[in-house]
Amino acid sequence: MFGSAGISQAEPNPVTLTSLTNYVFRQAPERLAEQSIIDTADAYAERAKTWFAEPASLNLFHYNDAIGSSNGLQEWETSISAPIWLSGEQRRQQNWAQELSNQLPYYQQKHRLQAAGQVRQHIWTVVHAAARVRQTEIRRDNAAGLFETVKAQAEKGYLATTDKLIAEQHRMAAQNDHLQAQAELTQAINQYYYLTAQRQLPDNVVESLPSSLKITVDHPLLAELSQQITILHSEMASTSLTAKQNPNLSLGIKRERGSGSEPFNNSLGLGISLPIGQTNYAKASVAEVGRKLANIEVARQSLKRRLESSLLHQRDTLSALRDKQQRLQAQFSLSETYQHKQQKSFDLGQIDLRTLLLVEAEHNATRNQLQMTQIEINQTIAQINQTLGIMP
């Protein structure tokens, strides 16, 4: 596609927008956090499977009257205390763990879309630079041909020596522009290579507009925030119970005697402690989750508004570019006809070289604008797809 610009086209595997996006996504630093998402979900899931709400504890007590009456009183008590789940607490913990696990694909889609945006941006930077190289290459070749013609005419005495100097200056300026364009293309290709490990562009970089141009809830960026909201709702439901103290079930044995002359008496004990008045103690934890939930909801609504604003701007830009393209096409047709006539006038000696160069400069500028406008139209379509959250 851009062979004249020095971009290789001979690759064993086809390069597509999809393959480039997949590569950039695989290299994304954000993927390092994926395992932590999995580990967090697994940890909460394992906790929800436990028999008790908190770790059980082993208790051992011993009492005697060695520093008191010294009658030989002894008392040994051993028990196991286990906090038991509140009604619905374990199920809410399981739901929370499941929502944490569901977060991973949304997280991946978000960063895959960001990778697609980077690929699109670098591709169109290269396309712009390559088009600029082609345009300056044509101008350079035309300037070189004109210089040779003027030089020959000047040597025969048909044109003044100053015309030869003007033509040479024009040729050198065209060469400098071409060298500058090549340098910019090299920089663009190097950045593209750094991102994608490719020096070849896809055979087709032109995208098409979808039938619907609306920001939907399925947008990867919005969907990821929506999943965070779902997680926080589950966390709030779980926190409303986990922030409370759990009932404590105790089971133990007691061995005691009143004096040294008495035999030990063994007994089995079962007890339960029920905390009361916990509502106010749990409110702070629930309110903190609610604050996080409100912040995420604000972020989601703000992001949706920014996406809609960007989409509106891009649609207006696309419409303006298409109108501009139609005007430039008409202008280019007139400019081409006028340039041919002025070239004939110059050949007949009816106009001087400066006039011809001005006409050619205007004609080239119109042609270049027309080419760049088409590129900008295609780039704007790609930007619209990016804003809509459409993957390549």
Image: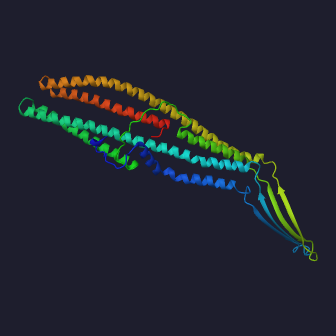
- Tell me: 321 left or right of 165: right
Q: Position of residue 74 (x, y in %)?
A: 88, 72
Q: Residue at x 22, y 23 (%)?
A: 338
Q: Residue at x 84, y 67 (%)?
A: 253
The answer to whether residue 346 is above or below residue 28 is above
- Tell me: 268 left or right of 288: right
Residue nearer the viewer, 374 or 158: 374
Q: Position of residue 299 (x, y in %)?
A: 57, 39
Quadrant the N terminus occupies: top left
Quadrant the C terminus occupies: top left
Q: Residue furthest left?
A: 156
The answer to whether residue 9 is above or below residue 316 is below
Coloring applied to the structure: rainbow
Q: Residue furthest bottom?
A: 261
Residue nearer the viewer, 268 or 229: 268
Q: Position of residue 53 (x, y in %)?
A: 73, 55
Q: Residue at x 36, y 40 (%)?
A: 125
Q: Position of residue 378 (x, y in %)?
A: 39, 34
Q: Is residue 170 visible?
A: no
- Tell me: 335 left or right of 196: left
Q: Is residue 132 visible?
A: yes
